[in-house]
Image: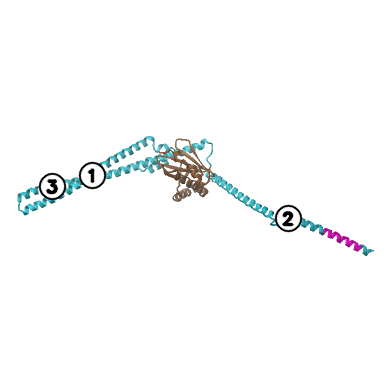
Amino acid sequence: MQSLQQQLEGLDELTSARLGAPVSLQPIPGGIPVVQVVVGGREELPIFVTASDAQILCICYLWRDEEIIPEKRLSLLELMMDLNPSIPLSSFGRVEGHHVLFGALARDARVEDIVSDVVALSDNALDALEALAEYLR
Amino acid sequence: MSVIGKIATLIKGSARELGESIVDANGVRIYEQEIREARDAIAQAKSDLTGVMAKEMQSAREIERVRAEVTRLENLTLEALDKEKESLAEEVAAKVAEQEAELEKQTQLHAEYAVQANRLKELIKASEAKVREHEREVQMAKTTESVYKATQTISDSIGASGSKLMSARESLERIKKRHEDLTDRMNAAETLDRELGTRALEERLKEAGIGEDAHRKEKVLERLRARREKKAAEVVDTAADTATSTEAKA
């Protein structure tokens, strides 16, 4: 099986060409392979690409539990569930209190497929943040 | 319990330890061993199935052969009876009986092979389903583990770099602000371009002697000359007036 970094070769240039902004890749040191993708102009919304035996996950961290206005919490969660099927290539999720948008690909996905997922995820994350900001403190 | 059910239970319990508790390394090894064994069993069952199906086909052919033989011998018996060769007919009838017994045996064998083949097919199907289920279980467990570990790695990295994870609103505002700045800069550049373009055109028109600005100098001179002439005329008029009034007094 290819290492994640090998698999992501060329991801920065291809993503940059699609988004029309500079893109940088930064491996995050730690026990598990994680590569941070930063899109110029959207530095606050980096995308993290990680791999397990079964799949590749692209994750964008949106907000933490405590950022949600308590009385709007239920309607936000329901809205996110309702939105899930409509959002192209990305789904809402929650990891350790972080609400995320993520896309999953087969472990042997081509770099072009990962690029499509990353581009969609970056656009979707910004869009979701704008659309759902009214539910946040 | 389904693997989603197991993960749900663990999430409800303690999400923090999910990464470690969902599958300890030993658990994964056991599952992987089971998957290997199930795969071996499937390979063995498939090879057994090939053998059984071959025997099933052989017995089918044998049945056909024996049936044909029975028909042939029956016809011979009838012929012998027609020719009133009783003892010959009896002898052939004994052969018919023998072949009929063989037919019965082969039919039974054939049925047994069919049952055996079906049983093996079921076994293969069940084992394959089991392998798929185990693989899915291991994959989900490993993915859950990797997502949680990745989040920890990311949090640790953010913590170590000293940068604070911004709130979503702050992030959005900064991105929007940057976007607005960019739009403003682009608009400003566009306006500047436009203005510079207009000025350059005006310069060229002036050089060509076209437009209001072209003869400004001449116009100024003209205006000043006109003013001077008017003034001179006034002086002449005043002098004439004075002369007239002096004459009148005189």
- Which residue, given by chain and number where applicable, does mark 1 sit on? B54
Q: Position of residue A35 (x, y in %)?
A: 47, 39
Q: Earlier in the sequence, mark 3 or mark 1?
A: 1
| Magenta stretch holds residue B243 | yes
- Which residue, given by chain and number where applicable, does mark 3 sit on? B99
Instruction: Say if labels 2 and 1 share a chain.
Output: yes
Q: Position of residue B3 (x, y in %)?
A: 37, 42
- Which residue, given by chain and number where applicable, does mark 2 sit on? B216
Mark 1 is on which residue type?
A: Ala
* Magenta segment: B230-245
Between label 2 and label 3, give the one nearer the viewer: 2
Question: Can residue A61 be seen here?
Answer: no
Question: Can residue B40 be seen here?
Answer: yes
Q: Colour of chain A?
A: brown
Chain of residue at mark 1: B
Q: Give left or right: position of B164 versus B200.
A: left
Q: Do the residues labelled 3 and 1 touch (CB within 8 Å)?
A: no
Please name whichever residue, A94 or A88, is drawn nearer the observer in this view of the structure.
Answer: A88
- Could you say which chain is coloured cyan in the image? B
Please name whichever residue, B224 or B184, is drawn nearer the observer in this view of the structure.
Answer: B224
Please name whichever residue, B134 or A18, is drawn nearer the observer in this view of the structure.
Answer: A18
Q: Are marks 2 and 3 in contact (CB under 8 Å)?
A: no
Q: Are marks 2 and 1 in contact (CB under 8 Å)?
A: no
Of all residues shown, which one is farthest toward the right? B250
Location of the C terminus of chain B by quadrant is: bottom right
The answer to whether residue A109 is above or below residue B240 is above
Q: Earlier in the sequence, mark 2 or mark 1?
A: 1
Mark 3–mark 1 distance (CA, rounded to whole Å): 23 Å
Helix, strand or loop status at disc 1: helix
Mark 2–mark 1 distance (CA, rounded to whole Å): 112 Å
Chain of residue at mark 3: B
Q: Which of marks 2 and 3 is nearer the N terminus?
A: 3
